[in-house]
Amino acid sequence: MSGRDQTSGFNRPRLVVKRVLAKPQYEGDGAVVRRSIGRIELKSLDPFLLLDEFTVSAPAGFPDHPHRGFETVTYMLQGAFTHQDFGGHKGTIRTGDVQWMTAGRGIVHSEMPVEEGTQRGLQLWINLSSKDKMIEPRYQDLLHEDIKKAEKDGVEVRVIAGESMGVQSPVYTRTPTMYLDFTLRPGAQLQQSIPESWNSFVYIIEGEGLFGSINSSPVTAHHVLVLGPGDGLSVWNKSAKLLRFCLGAGGWG
């Protein structure tokens, strides 16, 4: 390919090189997760160690369990979770809120549903570099109203980490990371730049879309898509329903 790709607007558009359907499995105490990154078909995607879409109804949940050497990012799509750790930190995140926890040298905590009905969300694990693995644990909590948003031409983005559509997240990422929640209305198209040296993925929450190439096959909810090398991703919603997905990207420089 010579010059800029006229369809995508990128010199080297990222294409889908692997897709995996996240199938339900039990985790914790009666909770159900759809694991995409971290399952046999996709053991890791450096620096990402795991991605779960969790569905929990009380009394199920995630009782005391340890983490060490990485970060966990919990993004509530529906309902509310209360987090409590052995150091006395306690807090509740609700629909649209994010908790960015740096486990560092180690932490033992629990994550349990607060409300009746179904609690649903995403949890992403991000590896820490060797120099950061033994730092003190810390938290960054983002309320729904504090997550910056932008909207244009039928595309809405919530910027959890990184930058999109001229909007930047206040979250400090020890491992350089982009984490964006996109919603595309029917007929909308997205073009999102991604640093060329970073690995990247898409997780589809709702609807179906064309990713990477307008000639690709539509991909539906609960699939994770590993993106190949390039400088950006193009997405098209050719369906009659909303398309919602998260784009994650990260690297070490």
Image (cartoon, grey):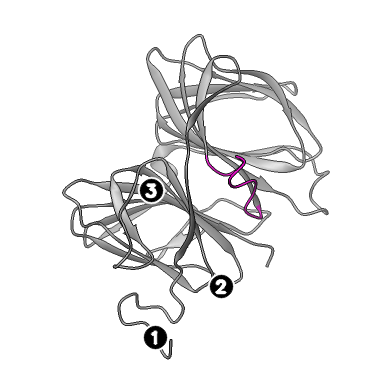
The range drawn in magenta is 36-47
State the residue at coordinates (66%, 54%): 47
Query: Dot 1: within a 10 Å radius of its alpha carbon, few (fewer than 14), some, or many (20 or more) residues?
Result: few
Q: Residue 245 carries which label?
A: 3
Sooner in the amino-acid sequence: mark 1 or mark 2 = 1
Residue 158 seen in render: yes
Position of the C terminus, as image quadrant, is bottom right
* Amino acid found under the numbered disc labelled 3: Phe
In this rendering, the answer to whether 226 lies above or below 12 is: above
Q: Which residue lies under the disc numbered 1?
A: 4
Q: Is mark 3 on a helix, strand or loop?
A: strand
In the image: residue 132, left or right of residue 82: right
Q: Distance between the residues labelled 1 and 2?
A: 15 Å
Name the main secondary structure of what is drawn in magenta.
loop
* Amino acid found under the numbered disc labelled 2: Glu
Q: Which residue lies under the disc numbered 2?
A: 196
Q: x, y (%) of residue 50? A: 61, 42
Residue 124 seen in render: no
Sooner in the amino-acid sequence: mark 3 or mark 2 = 2
